[in-house]
Image (cartoon, rainbow, N blue to C red):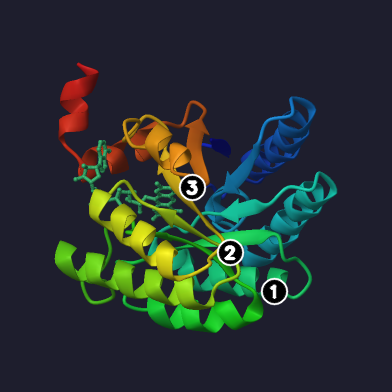
Amino acid sequence: MLAIINRLGEHTPDKKLIEGYTEEYLRLVDVIQGEKIQGTISVKPSQVGLALESSLFKDLILKIVHKAEEAGMFLWIDMENSPYTDATIDAYRGLLTDHKSVGMCLQANMRRTETDVRDLLPRGGKIRIVKGAYPENPEIVYNRRSEVDANYLRVLNTLFEQAEFFAVATHDGKLINAAKNMSRDHKANFEFQLLKGIRDDLKPGLVDEGFRVSEYIPYGPEWYNYSKRRLRERKRNEMIRR
Ligand SMILES: Cc1cc2nc3c(=O)[nH]c(=O)nc-3n(C[C@H](O)[C@H](O)[C@H](O)COP(=O)(O)OP(=O)(O)OC[C@H]3O[C@@H](n4cnc5c(N)ncnc54)[C@H](O)[C@@H]3O)c2cc1C
């Protein structure tokens, strides 16, 4: 399995903190390379400038992209809640003109996502498709789980048909099986991505079947928001911890 490492922390308008997170990502690239770890990093836009100024985010993400490129490393950009969606996609579009080894997350719960996928793929976009972790205004999202899953499948289909490289990020066995089935009919370049500590039972099997699997590993003291999202998805997680 490969690793995708994320330093927890988000929504920070504090310039000093933003600089600190950026420096930490630059160091992480060195550490991953130095320790010969198979993997990369994933960055939250509002952690490295987007909560203050979109131009600052563009400058800092470019700095991190350059560092990753020097190390021969692919880089992922997370997608956060909807106030950040336009600016994140805009920055990603800009990056794609000169930087091909960068991917970005899109959320199947968002009604706009199919359109975003169709816009980004011809530009060389590399998409990680997820269900979406943030509570949103009901008007801009699919509200029923069945609708989110159906949209996930539609996007997955498009990715299998058109994408150069993409990531299927879910713990949902139905969607994982659907991706496996689609992979039989398409010679697609993709990987499964799962969070560290979730569905550990599934991961070795996928590797044994020959699929590329990355584990997303968040770390750092800012655990609260991340854990809240995981608890919202699955209340039983709270019981497991006790
Ligand atoms: C690698 C990765 C990167 C991500 N990046 C982003 C991002 O950038 N932006 C964003 O909005 N979201 C991101 N997410 C989160 C995503 O949007 C979902 O909130 C999260 O993955 C839960 O949805 P699910 O697809 O696993 O399906 P769900 O419908 O939540 O779950 C399906 C099944 O998976 C199992 N399962 C799910 N969650 C758990 C759990 N916590 N513990 C144990 N079993 C569980 C259960 O069997 C459940 O029935 C990411 C997820 C992954 C895996």
The residue indicated by pointer 3 is: 211
Q: Residue at x 47, y 39 (%)?
A: 207
Whole-number angstrom distance, CA of label 1 to CA of label 3: 31 Å
Q: Nearer the viewer, residue 40 or 163?
A: 163
Q: Residue at x 30, y 55 (%)?
A: 177
Circle 3 crowding by C-alpha within 10 Å: few under 14, some 14–19, many from 20: some
Residue 176 drawn at (x, y percent): 33, 53
Q: Amino acid at mark 3?
A: Phe
Rendered view: 172 above or below 199: below
Query: Could you tell me which secondary element the residue under label 3 belongs to?
Result: loop
Q: If you read the primary sequence from the N terminus, does the residue marked by circle 3 or circle 2 appear first?
A: 2
Rendered view: 96 above or below 50: below
Q: Which mark is residue 165?
A: 2
| Circles 3 and 2 in contact, beta carbons < 8 Å | no
Rendered view: 62 above or below 202: below
Q: Quadrant of residue 5?
A: top right
Q: Amino acid at mark 1?
A: Gly
Q: Nearer the viewer, residue 144 or 48?
A: 144
Residue 79 drawn at (x, y percent): 47, 59
Q: Residue at x 51, y 42 (%)?
A: 214
